[in-house]
Image: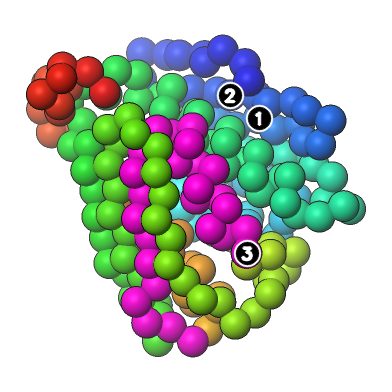
Amino acid sequence: MSEPIYTEDRKATVTRTTKETDITATVNIDGTGVSDIRSGVVFLDHMLTNFSRHSGMDIALVCKGDTEVDDHHSVEDIALVLGSAILQALGDKRGIQRYGWAMIPMDESLARCALDLGGRSYCVFSADFKRPSIRGFSTEMVEHFFVSLSRTVHANIHLAVLEGKNTHHMIEAMFKSFAYAMKMAVSVTGKDVPSTKGTL
């Protein structure tokens, strides 16, 4: 991946190019939720647009991937790039809340997310989807997206669907709960690094 491009604000741009995907993502943590998402996977566009809107982060993302093979490479690499951009935009994480959590309903579905931006990568995911795919997005890739993102954003992410029948609602509630948990975790509430170690 490319080296981070920093400004005085919490922004970063990351590019990743492989034989399978070519992705560029720009993140402004202190944005207004404006996005331009062109992932090549229609339903993932919808989910990332929701994530941007509800987290308050501005996100511009373009992916040219081998979706003629499968959505796997694009979804995985987008998660890796997006996580890297958020991590780099956070800098030394000084003053952030660090922890975030949210419980979001969407009709019959209810999703919960709790996360820690403390530097340790781990994802616990619990959901049972009834549909195998939605508009080119394989539902088995929802878990893989968050596992991959946890690796590069260096976060513990716990995501679960507590109630739900409609697969669209369940996945969207998960992305929205993740968005609100991230919005809380990245918020600036102090001046110090929120760790007894002095670094995250």
Closest to the camera, between mark 3 and mark 1, is 3
Disc 1 to disc 2: CB gap under 8 Å: yes
Q: Amino acid at mark 3?
A: Glu
Query: Which residue bears the numbered disc 3?
Result: 140
SS assignment at label 2: strand
Q: Which mark is residue 68?
A: none
Quadrant, the C terminus: top left
Q: CA distance from mark 1 to mark 2?
A: 6 Å
Q: Residue at x 40, y 37 (%)?
A: 121
Q: Which mark is residue 14?
A: 2
Please say whether residue 178 is visible from this viewpoint: no
Tell me the colour scheme of the image. Answer: rainbow
- From the viewer's perspective, tell me whether residue 88 is left or right of residue 20: left
- Percent coordinates x, y for residue 194 in the rendering: 15, 28
Which of the two discs, 3 and 1, labels the residue nearer the N terminus? 1
Disc 3 to disc 1: CB gap under 8 Å: no
Identify whether 181 is placed above or below 10. Answer: below
Q: CA distance from mark 3 to mark 1?
A: 24 Å
Where are the magenta residues, as a range? 140-165
Q: Amino acid at mark 2?
A: Val
- From the viewer's perspective, tell me whether residue 3 is left or right of residue 110: right
Q: CA distance from mark 2 to mark 3?
A: 26 Å
SS assignment at label 1: strand
- From the viewer's perspective, tell me whether residue 56 is left or right of residue 49: left
Q: Please rate how many residues cluster around mark 1, counting C-alpha atoms within 10 Å: few if below 14, some from 14 to 19, many from 20.
A: many
Which of the two discs, 1 and 2, labels the residue nearer the N terminus? 2
Q: Please rate how many residues cluster around mark 3, counting C-alpha atoms within 10 Å: few if below 14, some from 14 to 19, many from 20.
A: some
Q: Amino acid at mark 1?
A: Thr
Query: Which residue bears the numbered disc 1?
Result: 24
